[in-house]
Image (spheres, rainbow, N blue to C red):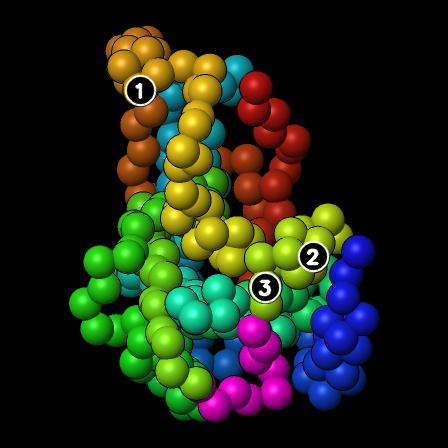
Amino acid sequence: MINKNVIKWLSNQRRKQLLSVKKKDLSKLTKWVYGKNEIYHKSKKFFKIVGIRINSNFYSKKRWDQPIIVQNEIGILGIIKNIKTKKYLLQAKVEPGNINKIQISPTVQATRSNYSRIHGGKTIPFLNHFKKKNKHFSLQTEQAFRYYNKKNSNIVSYVSKKIDLKPKFRWFSKIEILNLLKKKNLINMDTLSVFSSFIKKRKTDFPLNNKKAITKWKNSLNKKYFLKNKIINLNLIKDWNFTKKKFLIKQIIIFQ
């Protein structure tokens, strides 16, 4: 059961954090360059959208084209843990694509363009805890169907001193987090990614397969399957309509 104080805090954040989202035509996006080859920001930062052509024997559909996001930056997904209270510092974060507006996110969730303030936005709170060298980090790849070779640095930073918090930040106990996980679309995927990267082994563990067996299985699959890809111009992608308004797939692509 979710703590009443947590519910109250989330309700307050939903009222305070205002966000209005409106869809716009691709060609009318401010400070973005729309062209037949790619779509990119005028600063040449953030990300760009290009076409990609795939050839593989892994899926039922052997060859296909699609738009994909290219972002040659390693983002920071960082969570601060207090070693005295054993609590984790998370934030209520609003993002345009969220189903329920507010989701509980890592202490820091930002790309290099974000924390370099290319967009002219505010400074990122607690960023200094993650920019210095930290042995508690894990480099993880982003969703590969949407991003091309994108990686994020998952980091846990340990503190013992008191930290001044802004209203959208809150300390969470392990029990509170476990209860929040039972609610859909409340803890975001980046928070889950950081926690998953630092799960400690139990003193007694009984894995279904040992590391040697898993490595052998993985190597056998690498020999059996292949996947080749190459970047292409947006106007060359097959089975998609690329217009000034949007990308529209002509037919349903099924992967099995």
Of labels 3 and 2, earlier in sequence is 3
Of labels 1 and 3, earlier in sequence is 3
- The picture quadrant where one finds residue 77 is bottom left
Q: Is residue 129 above or below residue 87?
A: below
Q: Amino acid at mark 1?
A: Lys
Of labels 1 and 2, earlier in sequence is 2
Q: Residues within 10 Å of mark 3 (few under 14, many from 20)?
A: some
Q: Residue at x 56, y 24 (%)?
A: 255
Measured Cα–Cα span from mark 3 to mark 2: 11 Å
- How far across and how far down the image is residue 120, in percent? 41, 90
Q: Amino acid at mark 2?
A: Leu
Measured Cα–Cα span from mark 1 to mark 3: 32 Å
- How far across and how far down the image is residue 91, in percent? 56, 74
Q: In this orientation, which residue lies closer to the viewer: 253 or 85?
A: 85
In the picture, which quadrant includes the N terminus? bottom right
Could you tell me which secondary element the residue under label 3 belongs to?
Answer: loop
Q: Residue lying at the far left in this picture: please name it.
A: 133
Q: Is residue 68 above or below residue 126?
A: above
Q: Main secondary structure of the magenta part?
A: loop
Q: Which residues are magenta?
A: 163-171
Q: Residue at x 22, y 58 (%)?
A: 135
Question: Where residue 173 is drawn, which disc sits there?
Answer: 3
Q: Residues within 10 Å of mark 1 (few under 14, many from 20)?
A: few
Q: Amino acid at mark 3?
A: Ser
User: Which residue in the structure is indicated by mark 2?
Assistant: 180
User: Which residue in the structure is indicated by mark 1?
Assistant: 211
Q: Residue at x 59, y 64 (%)?
A: 173
Q: Residue at x 66, y 60 (%)?
A: 176
Q: Given contact means CB atoms under 8 Å apart, are the residues at marks 1 and 3 in contact?
A: no
Q: Is residue 104 magenta?
A: no
Q: In this orientation, which residue lies closer to the viewer: 9 or 16?
A: 9
